[in-house]
Image (cartoon, helix red, strand yellow):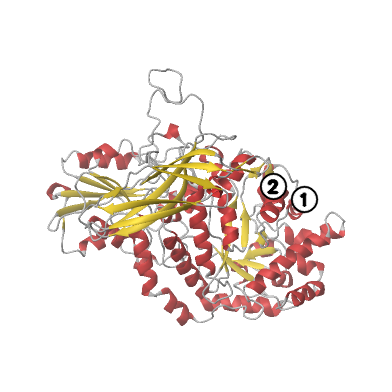
């Protein structure tokens, strides 16, 4: 449909019809047929006619393609202008085939895994009938007490921006109207990961300077990558909830970032304005959100009954409704829904997509690449013929997929026990008879994700007791750790001979873990979040700002703890391998000028006897700046596969934009002077190899 035709359609719509396009209702409300409203729809006095007018459906349960198609067709036919609804769904780390959680995908330090995960999830969900996914989540996360860190690529703005942009591209695959693509909704804009004390839905307190430098960049990268929708965060900025924050949604998102798509609330977020105390009722919430720049209301039912009334009472302009409605219609047009409202109505085609072996292969490769070897005292890989005991609450469990697994196919998910039992190279036995003990434990799936905040992100007392009993047997203990966040492992680490952080690895996770433990592949994941030593260190991250009184030997008054080291247990970017890598150590001095990038070259050699992946990371620190800078800042990274004794020369092109700071007004503060660079395998890489002289 042409732009002119869309505007003609908009002019033909009544005020109520336009307002209804800005409302989202649950798919489950329509399963009984458009003529029979069910559940909350009845309680809200919604008629079949008003349901048919609604612009979007949220897929709130697992359904098959024919069921989705029937609902979409019925609503389209019932609409006075035959405008189809958009079906939206959470496809966070896979749909039926689950990939590792996004925090684990971040640990690959490779955008290809992020893009492939998003591509496979979009293809499976589109075969079911979905049009939009609420993904990727690109909140920069630094507090492991917050349960939703599992949805983010990690603590670095650079990493979140790169992985988020790759997921947007993988989801859309160049054209969201294609039958196996989805439109991408990025979330949660912005600063949600700063929820006080890591407690879900708690307020945040953040400066605009920090927003411009840390929390906006991943969203801007995703907008540039083609994101179709943006979801504001549940929190507020400058004490104005993001869902109605005109500065956030209009000035920055649309004005500064150039976003032209649809803004949509999180579940019942407009309704939360009453809890924030900024709206007395849903009617006032509807006015505030519409004036603030929110296009679509997800499940608060503020817009549907109140927007037209507000216009007629002179409280808001109909032009605001028209602008928001046109953006929704443009999204539907971009998705090709006016021509093809139904993506697929064939159960056979859906099953063919869901059983594609290439998707399972991609999930296996992602799981193997995301696991992080944190410790290894020459225990791993296991030697052929070894007798191993596999114990722990995750040893024989299929609950290793992670959060957001509503549509997951758990029946085909192998347990660790099933996977290891199928390997003839080892014999499973009891701990007393074993050469090595594999202790599989960690968080439960349901203890991670939205609403799952913790004051103590660590192993449970029962798990620590079991680990102590196993360690007392005097045999090597390999901790296979399952988690959706960094855990405090300070007490557990001395009791283990090896630690493999498996995160929640997804549908093919068990086989991927076995491949790593048996040495079929070398671990290559690197931490996407810092692992603290103690809860009191949280939040702890690699790019903390420089502070007063740095550590000086012999001085009492400096930046430190008196009861614990200031260093993390495992730094950001950390990860071991079964092989070893050597980097060149030449000191290179270069000049970086505006518009003229500097190229940093480093050689990396696999000095071991097996193949492996090196993850090179470039950190920067500007010696002098008008604004306080991070002590070290990840500005680039590269994952490279190397055969034994193979050498590769890696180039990093650095620009002034990578080192730019922004003030409270969002104005760039160009870097000048001497910048130290560190190229290494984690955030402890020394600033000794490269020096940039930056000139304006």
The image's mark for residue 284 is: 1
Which x, y percent locates residue 350? Answer: 47, 77
Which is nearer the N-term, disc 1 or disc 2? 2
Between 110 and 85, the residue placed more toward the observer is: 110
Quarter where residue 316 is shown: bottom right
The image's mark for residue 192 is: none
Mark 2, residue position: 273
Task: Classify residue 494 as left or right of residue 544.
Answer: left
Quarter of the C terminus within the rendering: top right
Which x, y percent locates residue 104? Answer: 41, 54
Residue 465 sits above or below residue 649 on the image: above
Quarter where residue 33 is shown: bottom right
Q: Secondary structure under badge 1?
A: helix
Which x, y percent locates residue 214? Answer: 56, 45
Task: Classify residue 311 as left or right of residue 662.
Answer: right
* Mark 2 surroundings within 10 Å by alpha-carbon count, few (fewer than 14), some (14 through 19), many (20 or more): many
Residue 64 seen from this side? no
Quarter of the N terminus within the rendering: bottom right
Between 543 and 514, the residue placed more toward the observer is: 543
Quarter where residue 542 is shown: top left
Which x, y percent locates residue 384? Answer: 14, 58
Q: Which residue is drawn at 62% across and 48% down?
A: 234
Q: Distance between the residues labelled 1 and 2?
A: 9 Å
Q: Are marks 1 and 2 in contact (CB under 8 Å)?
A: yes
Residue 239 seen from this side? yes
Residue 482 sits above or below residue 461 on the image: below
Task: Classify residue 470 as left or right of residue 362.
Answer: left
């Amino acid at each position: 449909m042409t732009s002119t035709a869309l505007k003609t359609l908009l002019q033909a719509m009544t005020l109520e019809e336009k307002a209804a396009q800005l409302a989202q209702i649950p798919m489950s409300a329509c399963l009984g047929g458009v003529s029979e409203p069910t559940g909350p729809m009845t309680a809200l006095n919604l008629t079949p006619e008003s349901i048919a007018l609604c612009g979007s459906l949220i897929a709130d349960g697992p359904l098959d393609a024919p069921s989705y198609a029937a609902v979409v067709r019925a609503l389209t036919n019932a609409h006075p202008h035959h405008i189809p609804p958009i079906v939206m769904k959470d496809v966070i780390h896979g749909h039926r085939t689950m990939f590792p959680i996004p925090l684990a995908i971040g640990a690959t330090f490779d955008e290809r895994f992020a893009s492939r995960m998003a591509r496979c999830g979009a293809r499976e969900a589109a075969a079911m009938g979905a049009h939009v996914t609420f993904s990727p989540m690109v909140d920069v996360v630094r507090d492991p007490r917050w349960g939703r860190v599992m949805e983010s690529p990690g603590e670095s703005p650079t990493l979140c921006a790169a992985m988020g942009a790759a997921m947007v591209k993988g989801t859309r695959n160049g054209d969201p109207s294609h039958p196996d693509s989805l439109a991408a909704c990025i979330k949660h804009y912005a600063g949600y990961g700063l929820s006080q004390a890591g407690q879900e839905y708690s307020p945040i307190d953040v400066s605009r300077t920090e927003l411009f430098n840390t929390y906006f960049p991943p969203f801007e990268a995703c907008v540039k990558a083609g994101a179709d929708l943006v979801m504001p965060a549940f929190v507020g900025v400058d004490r104005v909830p993001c869902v109605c924050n005109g500065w956030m949604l209009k000035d920055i998102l649309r004005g500064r970032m150039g976003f032209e798509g649809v803004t949509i609330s999180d579940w019942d977020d407009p309704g939360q304005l009453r809890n924030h105390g900024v709206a007395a009722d849903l009617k006032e919430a509807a006015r505030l959100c519409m004036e603030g720049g929110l296009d679509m209301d997800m499940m608060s039912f503020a817009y549907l009954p109140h927007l037209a009334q507000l216009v007629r009472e002179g409280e808001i302009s109909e032009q605001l409704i028209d602008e928001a409605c046109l953006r929704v219609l443009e999204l539907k047009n971009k998705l090709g829904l006016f021509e093809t409202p139904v993506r697929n109505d064939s159960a056979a085609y859906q099953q063919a997509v869901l059983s594609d072996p290439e998707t399972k292969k991609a999930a296996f490769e992602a799981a193997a690449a995301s696991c992080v070897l944190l410790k290894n005292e020459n225990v791993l890989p296991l030697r052929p013929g070894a007798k191993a005991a596999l114990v722990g609450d995750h040893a024989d469990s299929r609950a290793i997929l992670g959060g957001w697994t509503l549509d997951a196919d758990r029946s085909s998910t192998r347990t660790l026990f099933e996977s290891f039992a199928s390997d003839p190279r080892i014999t499973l036995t009891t701990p007393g008879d074993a050469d090595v003990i594999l202790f599989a434990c960690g968080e439960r799936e349901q203890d991670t994700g939205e609403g799952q905040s913790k004051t103590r992100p660590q192993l449970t007392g029962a798990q620590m007791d079991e680990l102590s009993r196993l360690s007392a047997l005097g045999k090597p203990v390999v901790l296979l750790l399952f988690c959706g966040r960094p855990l405090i492992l300070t007490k557990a680490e001395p009791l283990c001979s090896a630690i493999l952080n498996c995160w929640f690895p997804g549908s093919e996770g068990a086989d991927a873990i076995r491949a790593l433990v048996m040495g079929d592949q070398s671990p290559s994941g690197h931490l996407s979040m810092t692992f603290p030593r103690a809860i009191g260190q949280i939040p702890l991250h690699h790019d903390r700002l420089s502070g007063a009184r740095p550590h000086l030997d012999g001085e009492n008054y400096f930046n430190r703890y008196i009861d614990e080291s200031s260093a993390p247990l495992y730094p950001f970017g950390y990860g071991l391998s079964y092989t070893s890598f050597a980097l060149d150590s030449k000191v290179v001095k270069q000049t970086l000028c505006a518009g003229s990038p500097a190229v940093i070259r480093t050689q990396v050699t696999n000095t071991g006897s097996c193949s492996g992946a090196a993850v090179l990371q470039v950190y920067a620190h500007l010696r002098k700046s008008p604004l306080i800078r991070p002590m070290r800042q990840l500005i680039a990274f590269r994952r490279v596969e190397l055969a034994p004794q193979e050498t590769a020369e890696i180039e990093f092109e650095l620009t002034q934009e990578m080192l730019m700071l922004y003030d409270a007004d969002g104005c760039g503060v160009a870097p000048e002077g001497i910048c130290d660079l560190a190229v290494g395998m984690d955030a402890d890489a020394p600033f000794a190899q490269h020096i940039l002289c930056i000139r304006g």
